[in-house]
Image (cartoon, rainbow, N blue to C red):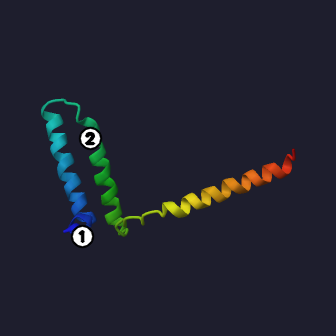
Amino acid sequence: MAEFFANPIFKTLLYAGCSAIMWVSILMATTSIIVPAISLSLATLAYGIAIIKRDAPAVALKEPNIGNIAVKAAVASNNTAVKSSRANPV
C-alpha cells in the first residue's frame, strides 16, 4: 500500500483534486484557505513537472548515525582546543 502512495502520478492527481476543491470553495466565498490552495497548486505543478521530465520518485534518506556525528564533533572541538593551547602557552 505504501508503494501506491509513493507513486508521483497518484500524488499529482491527489494534490490537483484537493487544490481544485479549495479553489472552488474560494470562488464561492472568499476565505482564508487561499494559502493552502496556492501551496497545493504549487505542489501539483512541481509533481507535474517531475512527471513530464520523468524524474525518479524521491526516496527516504537513511537515518543519520548520531553516535558517529557526536564523535566527529568531539574530535573536531578537541583538535581546536589543542591547537589554541599550543598557540598561546601559559
Task: Identify the residue at horizontal 56%, vertical 58% (top origin).
Answer: 70
Residue 29, percent across and down?
14, 30
Hey, which quadrant is residue 5 in on the image? bottom left
Measure how far apart labels 1 and 2 are at the Cα level: 26 Å
Residue 4, percent across and down?
21, 68
Relative to 47, residue 21 above or below: above
In-image side of 47 versus 72 (left or right):
left
Q: Quadrant of the N terminus?
A: bottom left
Task: Identify the residue at horizontal 18%, vertical 29% (top origin).
Answer: 30
Task: Identify the residue at horizontal 74%, vertical 51% (top origin).
Answer: 81
Is the C-beta separation of discs 1 and 2 under 8 Å? no
Hey, which quadrant is residue 55 in on the image? bottom left
Callout 1 amino acid: Glu
Residue 15, percent across and down?
23, 53
Q: Residues within 10 Å of mark 1 (few under 14, many from 20)?
A: few
The residue tagged 2 is 36
In this view, the mark in front (1 or 2): 1
Residue 63, percent across and down?
42, 64
Q: Residue furthest left?
A: 28
In-image side of 90 versus 7 (left or right):
right
Q: Residues within 10 Å of mark 2 (few under 14, many from 20)?
A: some
Relative to 90, residue 59 above or below: below
Callout 2 amino acid: Pro
Q: Which element type, helix, strand or loop, lies under badge 2?
A: helix
Q: Which element type, helix, strand or loop, lies under badge 1?
A: helix
| Badge number at residue 3 | 1
Q: Residue furthest right?
A: 89
Task: Identify the residue at horizontal 32%, vertical 48% (top origin).
Answer: 42
Q: Earlier in the sequence, mark 1 or mark 2?
A: 1
Front residue of 71/35: it is: 71
